Amino acid sequence: MDTNGVANELSEALKNPTRRYELSLTGDLQFKFIDTHYEAISSGTFSRVEHFAGNGKKALQDGTATKASFFNATAAVEIRPGEILVIDGHVIRHVSQSDEGVSVTTVAGGSAGYRDGEFTTENLSSTQSVLFNSPNNIRKCADQSLLIADSGNHCIRLVSADLKRAETILGCPGTQGCNNGSATECTFSYPMDAIELEDGSILIADSNNDSIRKAVRTVAGGWEVTTLAGGRKGKKNKLNKPKAFCENPVEGCILTIQEANLQPKVPILFVNTLSGEIHKPALSTYNVGVFSSVIPDVSPNTFLVVDQKEHVVMRLSPQGESSCLHAMDLSIVAGMKNMKGFVNGDSKVAKLNSPSSITRLAASGAL
């Protein structure tokens, strides 16, 4: 590779930020980052960042890649090859990629509110349209249905695989609390994430209750919710506003992101999905900002985590021979620490603006 040529190209490109540029570097991985107002793809071995969708304006505007705009994108999930759902404020957006290009459409939601029922995509202002209140995360289940942590409504919603209906499956909409019990008896306080495990149970990051809740199927086919970790279980299992999970548990434990505004700062931890036991790995020196999303990396027991405050994406990997449950290293793989912006190009000089989520595209191996 002509590194001098690459450096010269980057230098010229950065002098003119309005010029669209791209480096043709080798590699077969792709990563998709969702900025607050942009979506971008980084391809190669974390080698390049390029524009994907969104015009940089803070608004809810449907359209093509360069005409569409996002208001407050917080999470995304691929539902089918080339089709992504994005949580954006109080609405759900559909991003599709085809030979004709990328297009963005709003498929559900509107103003903040609560309503289950059928999607009415022809008229989102209809009094019968499905409504959400600051949903924070969206996850695909084994049957292709979608779990949504409807944070402002303090409940967990389920969207059908065909994107035609939404229903509340856990919690009492509009009612905060920390009650355990059946699906209609349990209460949450600003749940930030909900993820289905292999056995069909559901974990909920119950943020304002500082706890992780678990919902399991009953013999009768309903749900029973208990507190797995945190909450009132004592200092040993103390949590601080858990907000996101990583799929694919490691050694029976799920990696969890929590707020790191208390001393000592512990932004990540592992929670045993059966016992609720908490492991807090030591992290290499890093000025922790605000971790917002995490996914498995391609290597075993390694992860990619988004730091929204520092505007970077980092790799978490075990320290030496240590288990990832005990000690991990942090290294930046995309973006420039504490330097926000919208600059494409080599991942080491590209700039992101408050990236909030990272997701995997299964068909292409992209993330």
Image (spheres, grey):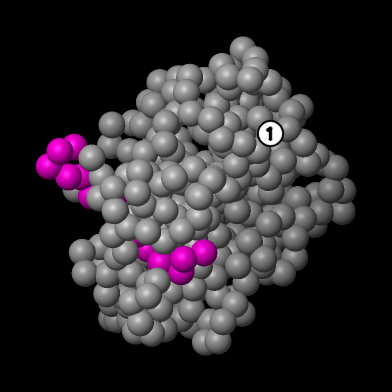
Segment colored magenta: 208-221
Left or right, 341 with reference to 280: right
Left or right, 302 with reference to 306: left
Q: Residues within 10 Å of mark 1 (few under 14, many from 20)?
A: some
Q: Is residue 86 visible?
A: yes
Q: Is residue 365 visible?
A: no
Read off the residue under disc 1. 111
Nearer-the-camera pick, 18 or 171 = 171
Count of marks, rendered view: 1
Residue shown at the point (58%, 31%) measured from the top left: 131
**What's the amino acid at mark 1?**
Ser
**Which residue ends up furthest to the left in the rendered image?**
219
Q: Quick check: 37 above or below 109? A: below
Determine which quarter of the picture holds residue 235.
bottom left
Residue shown at the point (48%, 28%) measured from the top left: 116
Nearer-the-camera pick, 119 or 273 = 119
Q: Quick check: 8 above or below 320? A: above
